[in-house]
Image (cartoon, rainbow, N blue to C red):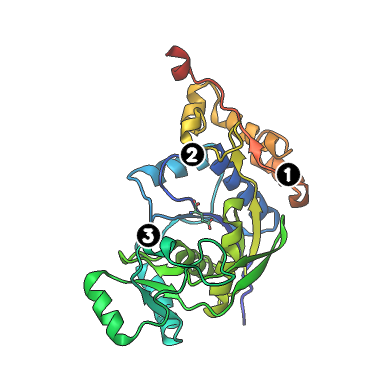
Amino acid sequence: MHSISAGAGRFAPSPSGDLHVGNLRTAILAWLFARSTDRSFLVRVEDLDRARAGSAERQLADLAAVGLGWDGEPVWQTGRSELYQDAIVQLADAGLVYECFCTRREISEAPSAPHAPAGAYPGTCRNLSDGERERRRRRRPAALRLRTGVAESTVTDQLHGEVSAAVDDFVLRRNDGVPAYNLAVVIDDADQDIDQVVRGDDLLTSAPRQAYLASLLGLPRVEYAHVPLVFNTHHRRLAKRDGAVTLESLQLAGFDAGGVRDMILDSVGLPSGPLDRALAVFRPEELPVDPWIFEPPETAAHAKV
Ligand code: GLU
């Protein structure tokens, strides 16, 4: 007998510092999307890159403080290297991986291929001879890139509709041996039976390449919902330097965790109070698609100086 998996949604923060209200808002929305579709809700610590000691624990504590619960233990990416390596071997066996010796600078200075979008890898190392590869290996460890067979790919997003974006020969493993985000995210989502990806819309144009990679690996498609970011009053992405934007700093400014949760719920037109109340009336199609402009309150700490 086959058991039918109900699937799962997730929140997958990079532990590079404290979460700000934008991250907390994305987490709450991811939870609402998952729970309103009877999915489990998982948290994954994306600590392959940019990890700061103690940051993941603080992020998890902040998620719990605003009332988010998740199923099972959070998964940490470090310690899962074998999974990523197996996927690279599978792609390499299919002839879809090549070594790249380019520096960032070489890539930005190389003439781009005709019709290639800005920033696309120009293909410099795609067809090196064995001898040339041998020579370059002695100078610099190789990154591994995907030998992409399409120019672009398309996904359907619940908030943005059909979204197409270019797919270049993106990096699978960096030249320091760390699996690249685009590979890890695809492997992890599939491994965790995640079939609903809700995250900030800064990653919208990464979704097509991730969906393409999943298809090459024979992994199931996921549903996407890319939710709006939070901007500062200059209409730039919210950052720590904008002032009281983390839970801790908002607490210093006099808000408690429930107050921060309510501020976030209010920004998406949902009732304040425990998250179950918002869940009861949550409708994805009613979500704003424009960024939330957040003006940080004066903190007590700031007020003193
Ligand atoms: N770890 C990524 C971030 O914090 C999110 C990745 C994802 O949700 O796919 O930006």
Instruction: Report the Cα–Cα distance between label 1 and label 3.
Output: 39 Å
Amino acid type at circle 3 is: Arg
From this view, report whether residue 8 is shown above or below residue 22: below
Q: Residue at x 39, y 66 (%)?
A: 179
In front of the other: 146 or 216: 146
Q: Residue at x 42, y 62 (%)?
A: 109
The image's mark for residue 152 is none
Instruction: Label 3: state its secondary structure.
Output: helix
In the rendered image, residue 251, in percent from the top left (x then y), is placed at 50, 26
Q: Amino acid at mark 2?
A: Asp
Task: State which quarter of the image contains the C terminus.
Answer: top left
Q: Nearer the viewer, mark 1 or mark 2?
A: 1
Res. 128 in view: yes
State the image coordinates of residue 263 (x, y, percent, origin top left).
64, 32
The residue pinned by badge 3 equals 105
Q: Is residue 164 left or right of residue 112?
A: right
Q: At 60% from the left edge and 60% from the top edge, which residue is drawn?
A: 205
The crowding category of the residue bearing disc 2, from other C-alpha atoms within 10 Å (few below 14, some 14 to 19, many at least 20), is: many
Q: Which residue is mark 1?
A: 288
Q: Is 141 left, or right, of 19 in this rendering?
A: left
Relative to 280, is 192 above or below? Answer: below
Asked whether residue 218 appears in the rendered view, the answer is no
Which residue was labeled with disc 2?
Answer: 62
